[in-house]
Amino acid sequence: MMGQPHGYGPAWGPMTALIEIRDVSHRFETDSGPLHVLDHLNISIEEGGFTAVVGPSGCGKSTLTRLVSGLMKPDEGEVWLHGERVRGPRSTVGMAFQNPVLLEWRSILNNVVLPLEIVPNKLTRAQKEERARFLLDLVGLSGFEDKRPSELSGGMRQRASLCRALVHKPEVLILDEPFGALDAFTREDLWQTMHKVKQEEPFTGLLITHDLRESIFLADQVVVMSGRPAHTQYLMDVPATGPRALDDLYTPEAAERLNILRHQIQIAQGRTADDDRKEAAE
Amino acid sequence: MNISKVITPVLAVLVFLGLWEALVWVNDWPNYKMASPSDLGPAFTRYWELFLVYGWQTLWRTVAGLLLAIVVGTALGMIMGFSRTMRDGLYPLLVGFNAIPKATVVPIIALMFVGAHDFNTILIAFMISFFPIAVSVSIGLSTLEPEYRDILRSLGASQMTIFWKIALPKTLPEFFGALKVAVTLAFIGTNLMEIVSPHGRGLGALFDSGKTNSDYPLMFAVLIALAVLGILLYYVVVVLEKIFAGWAERQPG
């Protein structure tokens, strides 16, 4: 077994975690030869947990989401979901991306209903719409059900996208930089909405992000992936007493956490603080 | 429905006819140089039965060719949109085929299927108009953002579901754009065959007989009739577009 700095090996044996990424390696064939993206990656997420994954650009974070959702199979290693090995797409997963990809020809309500038209269920049309309305209300979009996506702001579209990801009550919510394209204030609004949603609609979350403050605000576990080929470089647990209100992000404790994470990202990028200073001086 | 939406185009047509009449009158052109709008009225009243019968022949054959172009064009577009290999293979063939002036194909087709006048006319209308449809559908499908696919695939949707729920509706605006081009092209195809074929039918044949008999106002009247049919069919497409792809239209302002 490869020794890892945080001493976090794969937990062979009885399954306790809802999402278990075990020793996963993956390569892509590109025109300029094989690209080694993931190298013996291990991540374990408890049921009801919320894990944020941060790392340098191009380190394979999006590949990770495709592996967990079953859209791709890893070359080596295994991905387990609720005690079952992931071999293909499964409807117990909900996804939201940086691009909200709402269908322009459908109303907001019908966009949210979409997964219920695909996942097998016994709900009537009225029940499906009721479920969608409940979620839209939860994220503060009641009154916008009949609008077209083009009539909504970026933040509102992202809220609708979140509702669509949750409408079929998935066990796992995969968020691939969903707030990345929003302005800072809208983003903070959505962070708070996420806390509210998680209380009302429990899920196990996997969040890919570039924003360190976002990671400690939303997640109970932050994973730092190394540069390519990526392995799990560092793991930080954020206790329930961690920053859960926006003001908490400006405490010395939060600053300490962010500092540690920032330092780890620098290591993942293969840089040091001295490099940065030298570069700035030049 | 705004009343000015009707009045503005009607006024524009009247102004156009007025300018045309004035141009002929000022230059004192004879009929064989250029007929004036006031000559068209008598031509229409004299041959109105022929205009109805031939106009209908031209119209239904154009629509038939267009429907065939929609079916084949969409199928080709789907094949090229979903498979890279098929796109690489088919594109040069299609572009080459489209580059051949259809006027040169008309005599070949006319000889190939001698006597099958309806069939020949529909075939030319089809051949001249399927290309933009195939290209637009294939582009619409191949530029589908991968996230759309991922969202549905991660829910376990089949390729067919993805096509019906996302790919097809997303392609509709491009499809209707191409259809507007195809409508006018199909009219060109129909008339090419009608004019060239001996003992042809349709407005093209009426035009040809006007030429043979030196009936210049009749020739101009046929052109106007063709324009009217073209406008009619174009607006049918516009109405269909409003119904099926109205969502793509942004409100101005």
Image (cartoon, coloured by chain):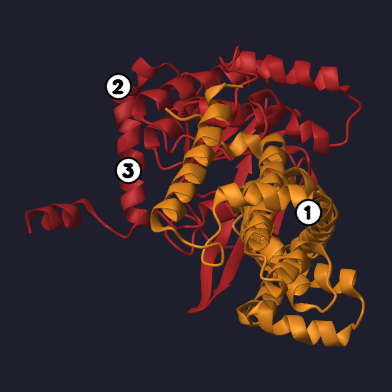
Chain colours: A red, B orange
In the rendered image, the vertical position of residue A28 relative to residue A248, given as above or below = below
Estimate the x, y position of residue B225 in percent, counting from the top left: 69, 52
* Position of residue B55 in the picture relative to residue A266 (left or right): right
Discs 1, 3 touching: Cβ within 8 Å? no
Q: Which residue is mark 1?
A: B47
Q: Which one is nearer the viewer's eye here, A42 or B246?
A: B246
Q: Please tell me whether mark 1 sits on a helix, a strand or a loop.
A: loop
At label 3, counting other C-alpha atoms closer than 10 Å, the crowd grade (few under 14, some 14-19, many 20 or more) is some
Chain on which label 2 sits: A
Q: Amino acid at mark 1?
A: Tyr
Residue at 77% over, 68% down: B205
The disc placed on residue A264 is: none
Q: A130 or A57: which is nearer to us? A: A130
Work out whether mark 2 precedes mark 3 in sequence or the reverse, and give the earlier one. Answer: 2
Is B61 on the left or on the right of A54, as rendered? right
Residue where numbered disc 3 is placed: A262
Separation of residues labelled 2 and 3 (CA atoms)? 16 Å
